[in-house]
Amino acid sequence: MTKTQQVLLAKRPSGLPDADTWRIATEDLPAIAAGQILVKVDLISIDPAMRGWLNDVRSYLPPVGIDEVMRSLDVATVVESAHPDFAVGETVSGTFGVTEYAISDGNGVQRIDLSIAPAATWLGALGMPGMTAYFGLLEVGKLRAGETVVISAAAGAVGGVAGQIAKAFGARVIGIAGGAEKCRVLIEELGFDAAIDYRGEDVLHRLRELAPDGIDVFFDNVGGDILDAALANLARGARVVICGAISSYNDDKPAPGPSRYMSLLIFRASMTGFVVFDYRDRYGEAVAKISQWLADGKIKAREHVVEGGVARFGETLNMLFAGANTGKLVLAI
Ligand code: NAP
């Protein structure tokens, strides 16, 4: 029998999740049956979407139930196998949850190749955030070489990869992030052409200065005032990609709509939301492309790894809302 410590949803939060939101429990897992594997979770992906999964509302996935193990994407090691496709010792990714060990029937579990990139990168540039950046920018945003792209939450997991993909495609890339250090990282380490510190600068006016001919693709992770500032600066035919709206994820009431939406009419622009899972069948294509860019040095993978096990899950999740991460936030078990 294997004991596992896990994080359960104790109470739906109002606003920022706090200690009352979570309950840590220890469970004895049964022996695996035919067709199952037992995995030891090594890394847990900490994602803004987790906040949405706590709300009892209609969404692209059902909410996490009270007393259920918190849903998460993980990298794990197979420690026992009664499944024909998985061998003991293999590294896999899957939705195992915020737990130390899990039993799986292999559904949705992928083997990952550590010769291409380290495990944490398979939760970042080669994982769900990388897929989001790739399909959001190229399929939804229909990016073309020579265009001006603006990305919000640009120093985060999705934003950092999106900006580097845009550069690899020959676009001019402006990132928006919180603080001078993140802006330095964008320009000096990730190769962005310009960066705006939304905490210290007037985003609307800085965008006007940096993109005098307008923004062709706005890849938005933040919503709110930053979305409005970008809408005020669109180029004709612009594509606004709604990837996320993290500025409102802890709001109890719906955030006000974009006040500058008439820009869509004025500039003959479009605004399109998307969910990365709809591109699941094409992940192989994106992994191949991003792996090549990583090998060529055109994309630098950056992860922000917090050590400490499942007990630190709650505080690590809240780091996203404080902007305490640069790159993909991961909790190491
Ligand atoms: P991330 O960017 O690594 O982390 C979140 C970042 O958001 C923080 O580091 C912080 O950076 C910024 N932020 C937090 N609160 C903010 C606020 N009130 N105003 C402005 N910025 C704020 O997270 P990620 O995993 O890459 O996700 C980025 C976005 O993509 C999220 O909106 C997420 O929901 C979305 N997403 C969508 C899909 C999809 O399928 N559509 C898939 C994955 C992710 P600063 O320090 O710069 O503020």
Image (tube, rainbow, N blue to C red):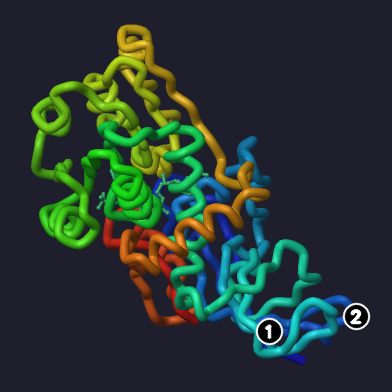
Give the amino acid at mark 2.
Answer: Ala
Q: In this view, does 15 lie above or below 254?
A: below
Q: State the residue at coordinates (71%, 89%).
A: 88
Crowd band around label 1 with a 10 angstrom C-alpha radius: few (<14), some (14–19), many (20+): many
Secondary element under disc 1, as helix, strand or loop, is strand
Q: In this view, does 315 lie above or below 136?
A: below
Rendered image quadrant of residue 87 = bottom right
Disc 1 from disc 2: Cα separation? 15 Å
Q: Is residue 253 above or below residue 95?
A: above
Q: Is residue 66 visible?
A: yes
Q: Nearer the viewer, residue 252 or 35?
A: 35
Give the amino acid at mark 1.
Answer: Val
> Residue 245's spot in the image, x, y percent?
40, 38
| Residue 89, numbered label | none
Residue lying at the far top in this picture: please name it.
Answer: 266
Q: Quick check: marks 1 and 2 in contact, CB under 8 Å? A: no
> Residue 30's spot in the image, x, y percent?
81, 84
Crowd band around label 2 with a 10 angstrom C-alpha radius: few (<14), some (14–19), many (20+): few
Q: Which circle's residue, 1 or 2, is located before the other in the chain?
A: 2
> Residue 81's spot in the image, x, y percent?
79, 85
Q: How many labels does the image show?
A: 2
Residue topped by disc 1: 78
Q: Nearer the viewer, residue 157 or 59?
A: 157
Q: In this view, does 211 lie to the left or right of 118?
A: left
Residue topped by disc 2: 34
Q: Can residue 7 be seen in this view?
A: no
Q: State the residue at coordinates (76%, 72%).
A: 104
Residue lying at the far right in this picture: please name it.
Answer: 34
Locate the N terminus and report the quarter of the image it occupies: bottom right
